[in-house]
Image (cartoon, coloured by chain):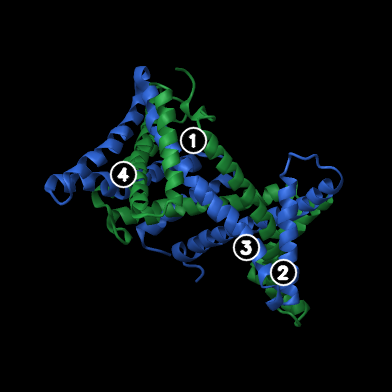
Amino acid sequence: MSTDIGVWIAAFLTLCIFSFLYKDNPFYKFAEHLFVGVSVGYGIVLTIHQGIIPFAWQPLKNSITGEAPLWRFFVTLIPVGVGFLFFSRLMPRYSWLIRYPIAILIGMGAGFAIPRAMETSIFEQMNGTLRPFGVINSLSAGEIIGAVLMLIGVVCTLTYFFFSVEHKGIVGGISKLGIIFLMIGFGSAFGNTVMGRVSLLIQRVDFLLGDWLGIVG
Amino acid sequence: MRRQVPLVLCFLFGITMTIQYYVPSRFSEDLKSEVLNWGLIIGPFALVLAIATLVRLHYTRIQRRSENWPYSIVVFVGLIVMAVVGTVQGFTSQGISGGPFEWIFNNIQVPMDATMFALLAFFIASAAYRAFRARTLEATLLLVAALLVMFGNAPIGDLIWQKISPVRPNLPSEVRQWILDNPNLSSRRAIIMGISLGAISQSLRIILGIERSYLGGGE
């Protein structure tokens, strides 16, 4: 059995959370609330040390000490000022000012997403689907079947999501085939998720029986 | 001032970030990194606001002695201890810098995080038991694909198969890999393309000011 106080605390909290399998109880509630508090605290630390300090505090400090040009001070001050507008939410009279930082962040995100989604999610995926047909002579029979199946799967699944045409006749048949591919995809995603969760469960049981009680390992 | 200026700001930042990608130059790269830095500075303030809301919620619960209010004290204790210890101690380039912060992270946060997700194994199994009924062709395919992937994922799958047929000892993991690389990937590719087309059209609507729900209601 472990003599490390940290292992005992971790084991206690693990058992507190597993106690939910019986029913909701004070031990689970304690662990749940502690988890929320600790996670938010970790988020604060992460934000301060990997966001505010390197991107806001350090440039401001450097421009004051002369390590960076003075214009950097003002350029950094603008987003800091815009960021402070988030707190207008706490004053009902000026709460509309929160739209400024939100609009900037949303505009930035939307503008950033368009070319990247086009590049990585559409062109790259199309490229991956069609590329094997460019080198079809060098592929084995199995690889050719795989490439054809891939193309059929992509076209049929896309047809299933194409609602501008009524799903009747040929389109209906193709979209039905798309459902089959989708079901296999969802099934394998489910299988992978289950296995991921089971791996975590095994790891926790291994921790309790090995690191804490010393029965195994 | 209240609605037009945010729309103009959204348009300017959105169009700048879009055009920047297609104009490969030093200026364009500098502009991108500057704008991204602005985002990294503005973003954390939203988190501060979220934390202020959480604190206000739990403070009100304690003040009014609402149901389960003592647990709100636990939230505060966890939050304050972690935030103070972490802020004072900080990060190094390698990540968490040892000491009490690492101790709290390894012995409190990580075990609870892992156990919360491990707990889902039970619920996912119970949901599967109730939902997986091979009533139609589609449901059967879902069930069979999930079972084959699980069987191929677990080492015991290959071990059992080796006892049945020694000819292709790794057949379960080969079948799993084939499912993942072919029918699964094709549906996933189509879904990714569909999501991206949706994201692009939604982004365009936002930039052009057609979609304004982020501005909220009122004047």
Q: Pinpoint residue B176: horizontal percent, then vertical percent.
A: 69, 67
For marks 4 and 3, give the CA distance: 45 Å
Residue on which disc 3 sits:
A128
Depth order, front residue of B207/B144: B207
Name the subunit of mark 1: B
From the image, tell me which residue sits under label 1.
B207
Asked if one can make out residue B85 in the rendered structure from this viewpoint, the answer is: no
- Same chain shared by disc 1 and disc 3: no
- For chain B, give the colour: green
Q: Which mark is residue B83?
A: 4
Across and down, in percent, residue B192 comes to 61, 51
User: In the picture, residue B77 is in which quadrant?
Assistant: top left
Q: Closer to the camera: disc 1 or disc 4?
A: 1
Chain identity of mark 3: A
Secondary structure category for the residue under label 2:
helix
Which chain is blue in the picture?
A: A
Q: Amino acid at mark 3?
A: Gly
Q: Residue at x 37, y 57 (%)?
A: A6
Amino acid on which disc 1 is placed: Ile
Q: Position of residue B114 (x, y in %)?
A: 49, 54
Picture disc at residue B175: 2
Check the image and report above or below for B150 versus A173: below
- What amino acid is found at the position of numbered circle 4 in the picture? Ala
The picture quadrant where one finds residue A44 is top left
Percent position of residue B195, x then y = 61, 46
Taking the image as drawn, is residue B190 in sight? yes
